[in-house]
Image (cartoon, grey):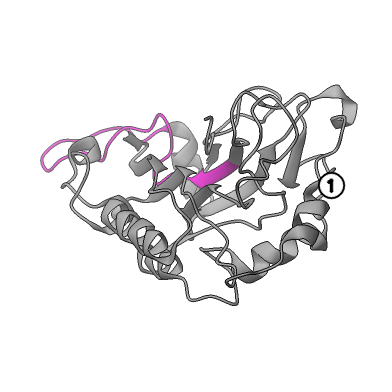
């Protein structure tokens, strides 16, 4: 869709599940097809049809099913223990229990985030990531992950399922250029969303629009149109009107964040 001459594409994804390397390659292929493959939609505002990555602003969120590429026979008992109690028991001020960048809750500790930094399928520094290469080609990025693993929980509880290796499956990716990220985090519990075996992830983003809201289109050849008063006054002073920024989402207190995964 288009807002003030700015082509915006928001995509919700649910990629292939599974922990094997073949599944990681399959997920990377699916992500490549979504971002760089054939266009999924018609062109916004009469524009030519383009791929997802060619829009002015791209937001991709959902259950990417990214897993930890741990070595075979890796001992994860210490990792599991570090996750116990990694979510604050009570939300600060009695609100929704969130953790992450720009959130009121504290960031997860190094014992929790260490395995993520090393072995995460997207950005682990000890593995070769096909998905990361797709993101580079699509000029997308992710904010810092400062929250505990979002998968897999026993539904309705704060306890992780011991039959699954915890992972950061639920993520939000966005354009590298023209975006200010205000918040990026996960909704824990109590006070969060505990009705599924995942924890929801959300982001609050701002972008500059390519046109001033409410201005008329430029006059066509042979016609004339009066310029809006504010831009004309700015031009007379020798300055250009500042391009306004518009939040794509209300603060969490007013509206729910863009959810990465609800169930």
Q: Closer to the camera, 167 or 125?
A: 167
Q: Residue at x 66, y 58 (%)?
A: 144
In the rendered view, tell whether residue 134 sits above or below residue 168.
below
Q: Main secondary structure of the magenta part?
A: loop
Q: Position of residue 188 (x, y in %)?
A: 72, 34
Q: Residue beneath label 1, please?
A: 106
The quarter holding residue 25 reads bottom left
Q: Quadrant of the N terminus?
A: top left
The quarter holding residue 134 reads bottom left
Q: Position of residue 156 (x, y in %)?
A: 68, 24
Binning the other alpha carbons within 10 Å of mark 1 as few (below 14), some (14 to 19) or many (20 upward) gives some
| 125 in magenta | no
Q: Residue at x 82, y 39 (%)?
A: 104
Q: Residue at x 31, y 54 (%)?
A: 30
- Residue 108 appears in the rendering: no
**Magenta stretch, residue numbers:** 204-228
Q: Closer to the camera, 210 or 9?
A: 9
């Amino acid at each position: 869709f288009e807002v003030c001459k700015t082509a915006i594409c928001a995509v919700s994804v649910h990629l292939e599940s599974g922990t094997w390397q073949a599944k990681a390659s399959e997920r990377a292929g699916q992500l490549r097809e979504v971002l760089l493959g054939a266009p999924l939609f018609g062109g916004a505002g009469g524009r030519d049809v383009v791929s997802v990555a060619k829009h002015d602003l791209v937001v991709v969120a959902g259950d990417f099913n990214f897993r930890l590429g741990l070595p075979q026979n890796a001992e994860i008992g210490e990792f599991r223990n570090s996750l116990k109690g990694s979510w604050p028991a009570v939300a600060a001020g009695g609100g929704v229990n969130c953790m992450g960048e720009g959130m009121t809750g504290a960031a997860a500790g190094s014992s929790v985030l260490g395995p993520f930094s090393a072995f995460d399928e997207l950005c682990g520094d000890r593995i070769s990531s096909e998905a990361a290469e797709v993101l580079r080609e699509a000029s997308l990025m992710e904010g810092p992950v400062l929250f505990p693993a979002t998968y897999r929980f026993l539904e309705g509880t704060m306890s992780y399922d011991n039959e699954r290796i915890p992972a950061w499956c639920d993520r939000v990716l966005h354009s590298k250029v023209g975006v200010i990220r205000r918040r990026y985090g996960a909704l824990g519990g109590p006070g969060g969303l505990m009705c599924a075996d995942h924890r929801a992830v959300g982001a609050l983003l701002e972008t500059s629009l390519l046109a001033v809201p409410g201005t008329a289109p430029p006059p066509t050849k042979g016609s004339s149109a009066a310029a809006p008063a504010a831009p004309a006054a700015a031009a007379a002073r020798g300055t250009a009107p500042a391009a306004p920024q518009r939040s794509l989402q209300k603060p969490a207190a007013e509206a729910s964040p863009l959810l990465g995964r609800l169930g």
